[in-house]
Amino acid sequence: MPEAKKPEAKPEEIAAKTDKAAAAPADTELPDDETVPGGQSELTGLFVERPESTTVIKGKNVTFVAKVDSSDLLRKPNMKWLKGKWLDLGSKAGKHVQFKETYDRNSKVCVCVTVFTFSQICTSESLLYICVTLLCVVYVFLSPYLNQVYTYEMSIIKVVEGDAGGYRCEATSKDKCDSCTFEVTVEGGSLPEDAGDLDFSALLKKREKKARDEPKEEVDVWEILKDAKPCDYEKIAFDYGITDLRGLLKRLKKMKKVEPKKSDAFLKKLEQCYSVDKGKRTQMHVELHDPNVQVKWLKNGVEIKPSAKYVFECVGNKRTLTINKSNLSDDAAYECVVGEEKSFTEVFVKEPPVTITKLLDDVHVVVGEKVEFECEVSEEGANVKWMKDGVELTKDGKYRIKKDGKKHTLVINEATIEDIGMYYVYTNGGESKGELEVEAKELEVLQSIADLSVKACEQAMFKCEVSDEKVVGKWFKDGVEVKPGNRIKMSHIGRIHKLTIDDVKPQDEGNYTFVPEGYALSLSAKLNFIDPPKIHLDTSSTGSKNTIVVVAGNKLRLDVEITGEPVPTVCWMKGDTVISEAEGRVRVETRTTLSSFVIEGAERPDEGQYSIIVTNPAGEDRAELNVKIVDVPNPPENVRCMGVGEDTATITWDPPKFDGGAPIKGYLMERKKQGSSRWTKLNFEVFESTTYEAKKMIEGVFYEMRVFAVNGIGISQPSGNSKPFMPIAPTSEPTRLTVEDVTDSTCALKWRPPERVGAGGVDGYIIEWCKEGEDNWVEANKEPVDKNTYRVKGLPTGEKLLFRVVAMNIAGRSPPCTMKQSVIIREIMENPKIRLPRQLRTKFIRKVGEKINLVIPFQGKPRPVVNWLKDGEPLENKSVGIRTSDFDTILFIRSAERDHSGTYTLSVQIDNMQDKADIHIQIVDKPGPPINVMVTDVWGFNAALEWKPPKDTGNTDIIGYTIQKADKKTQGWFTVYEHNRRPSCTASDLVMGNEYSFRVFSENICGLSDEVAFSKNTAIIGKTDLEYNKPAFKEKDMSSSPKFTAPLVDRVVVAGYSTAISCAVRAYPKAKIVWMKNKMIIGEDPKFLMQNNQGVLTLNIRKPGQFDGGKYSCKAINDLGEDEVECRLEVRGTGSHTHTHTLSRIHT
């Protein structure tokens, strides 16, 4: 669709834009084809108030204010403050630059409601009318919320020289944008103390600018950027001082224009919209490719027929639709149809504003007269709005609004004082105002009303006289209108007005006012009621007549109501002493009808007889009252503990010496643990006795007790704490008494602690014995033993004895634990036996320097003799320690060395009975470097390496090699292979023209060797010539005799567990494989399974037995020769007394 034509601007908008253009500096003007950064926005007059250029004294504060009208915006506008071209001050907000944002809902900014969207949707005039009506209703309800003016403020605190320069503020909202510029000039002044902290530009030294020979022409950087490549954006931005690269890219993206789609029928389509004043003529033009083609004109989807109003013109390839004398019905959507193609547009008909041709005049009237405000407008039948004090005036009983052609009148039937004010009339094109002044009528008072003083039950009469007999009025009492009744009567005879009150009562007292209607006049007088004084004192709830009981320390406040007119004087006395009204602990507070007697913190001396006396001119009244002070009792005395149990204690105390003036009702007890500050209540109901048994206490814990006394007033202070006491009881009997060992004269006993020990704990145990059938128990130990085992010595040999154990603590002996069966005192024999731990049944491997600590338990009676051997010889190495007890032996080495490797034999012996166990210890270390590393062949980008295994394997098998390469240029080492199992490898992907050296590490279970073997020669990857001369093919002889690349390894296995031995062979032609056991060929025995997988030979042995051990060998034979490897397989049984173990894993 072609680009839309903007509607014609109003004269006011054109003038405003002209002023803005004149005020803006020349360097801020935008080209016609340039859009505002941030979107395809058009420049519109959003600003109601713009910031102005100013001159500021250095060190002072300055604030710039901008106001934005948001009545035409769908959302809140976005405000940006910029310095120069691209410096966004929003990122500098802080102590030096501050921002503030507010808005005013009640602003009088005009709100424009547009119906462009509805006119595009609606296809009939009636539907369009309904939509416009609905929109107007919405506008009426939402107008208080749409009329918003946003106020934006930017404050610069303590201006410095660096703040001088050009500034710009931009207001954007979706498709609208407005901006303005202003200048800040900084004049000299004292530099603020903190200016150096905020702006360092002022500290820079000034340098004279070099005069340029030729001034540079101003260049539009955006035109350069539009034609430049994206890779040059950063360089161009640097050359022209643009720092906001992100904003630059956004603006370039928005500047890209989309080429409109070309039409096959139209050379030029209709403008997007047309604007015309009501009654004027408008024309719409299109240009066609084919001058002979017919077109149709549609209005809201309905074809238009030619008429005097709608005129069709056809000149060449140009087609014109002319609308004469436009009215509101012509405000619609129009289409020009050519075949299948259409061109759309809209016509907006603007109605001229209604102006006020005759303004309102000020009106001055007297109260009750008729008021008319009259004005004339430019058009007949126009709508106007009348308002007063911001409120619209409507037709009601007070106001009438008349309309006669162009004349409009506001009528007020009877003017009152409340009608005074400014009245406004509004049209859509102007307004006028007129002031109404209402003057009150004057009335002469011939006789005013006078003040009265009346006693109870008498009559009071107020009388006044005015000059006008027709004047009526109202009577008021204290501002409230007086209504006539049985006692109150009002009369009006001629010019005299009366108010009569019979049987006067106290509530009749007050200020009475007569107000004539229609006059700003009032007559006032006071009615004074006279009454003798009286004291209203009620002490019925205090027990005895006029007796008040007060708890000591509490506040007494006795409020006594006093009546009487005039207000009587009050005097309080205690005996013959007058109580003053001054501030103090005992004082009197007096108000109009209330006198208060106050005692702050009542004390015993405050008891006594008090009297109150009230007097006024009408008489006197007197009352007597008695004040009694009561208190809580003193605390109980001499709290003590009389006895304790397992969880109980008996407490007693003496009653308090003073009961507080009320009988003692009982006591409350509390207890706490010694050293704690938390007290626990023992009873919630009052306990009447002075002896109490405390229960549910924790045994072995020290407690303290205290007691409170309770009377009718309250609870006393706590008594002094009792001396600490502890509930405690003996333990229960020990359990599970058993015999652990018996000799000819001793017996070793073992038992478990008591199930219930208690807080007293166990101090020890007493062991007793006696002969079976007797009751004479003998103590085996004089002092209690701490352990749960004891060997009783000095027992008679061969006797049957009973044993028992008693636990001892601070409370005494526990019940005894007695053995149910007797014990014969006689030696018991037990064969020696070693209980070898599971981890020692295989080869025990440790690294050099690690600690070894082997604990091996054994059994046997009497105590066996323990002996250690290494490799069949006595263990004499001082670095190996041996410790032996009755039940186990320990072998420990603080720092293992390779010399400690070997077979250690442990033997335990009793007489001619013996048990042995072998422990295989292997100490391993890192291996040495490989031997004789050579580059054996170089071809293409590959190099072949070979070497020999290291001399020192670290006392364990070599598990692989690590090969690294380095070229002579960089001397940097890079890994080629890791964990390479063979003593050879091929290095690939070498770089042509480089010379490479290699190094190899050996690896075992301890890691890589510390030393490295370097290749004795290097591999040079030669550069190929430009011409390749293919050499003659020469077939390589691959024949070779059998050679084992991986030998067989000795194995030790456990009987009953399947195992396998393997090796690797290389031979061409393929070799014949022969497996032998003890030099005898293994045939088709199903116990053995032989496999050959690309030279890797494996012999699987299914569940080997003791007879499957021996020497196994593997022989490879072909026409060129033969090779043989062998190993030893040892099968160990699981039930043998001699335990030999092999390597399973590394213990760390």
Image (cartoon, rainbow, N blue to C red):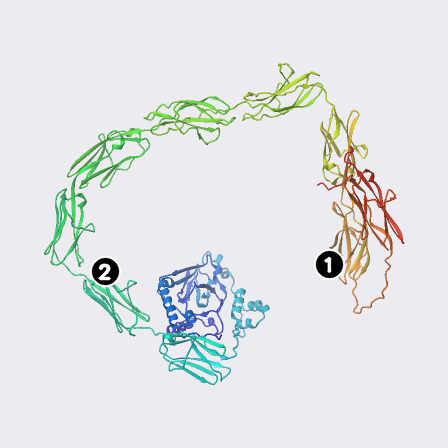
Q: What residue is disc 1 on?
A: 970
Report the mark closest to the observer, 1 or 2.
2
Residue 756, picture quadrant: top right
Q: In the image, what residue type sits under mark 1?
A: Thr
Residue 894 in sight from this viewpoint: no
Q: In the image, what residue type sits under mark 2?
A: Glu
Between 469 and 443, which is closer to the camera in this rendering? 469
Which residue ends up furthest to the bottom in the rendered image?
Answer: 316
Q: Residues within 10 Å of mark 1 (few under 14, many from 20)?
A: few
**From the viewer's perspective, is 365 left or right of 554?**
left
Q: What residue is disc 2 on?
A: 418
Q: Is residue 1101 above or below residue 82?
A: above
Between 121 and 598, which is closer to the camera in this rendering? 121
Labelled disc at residue 1054 = none
Alpha-carbon span between mark 1 and mark 2: 105 Å
**From the viewer's perspective, is 1008 left or right of 322?**
right
Q: Is residue 1012 above or below residue 119?
A: above
Between 115 and 492, which is closer to the camera in this rendering? 115
Q: Is residue 524 above or below residue 147?
A: above
> Quick one: quadrant of the C terminus?
top right
Between 460 and 530, which is closer to the camera in this rendering? 460
Residue 184, picture quadrant: bottom left
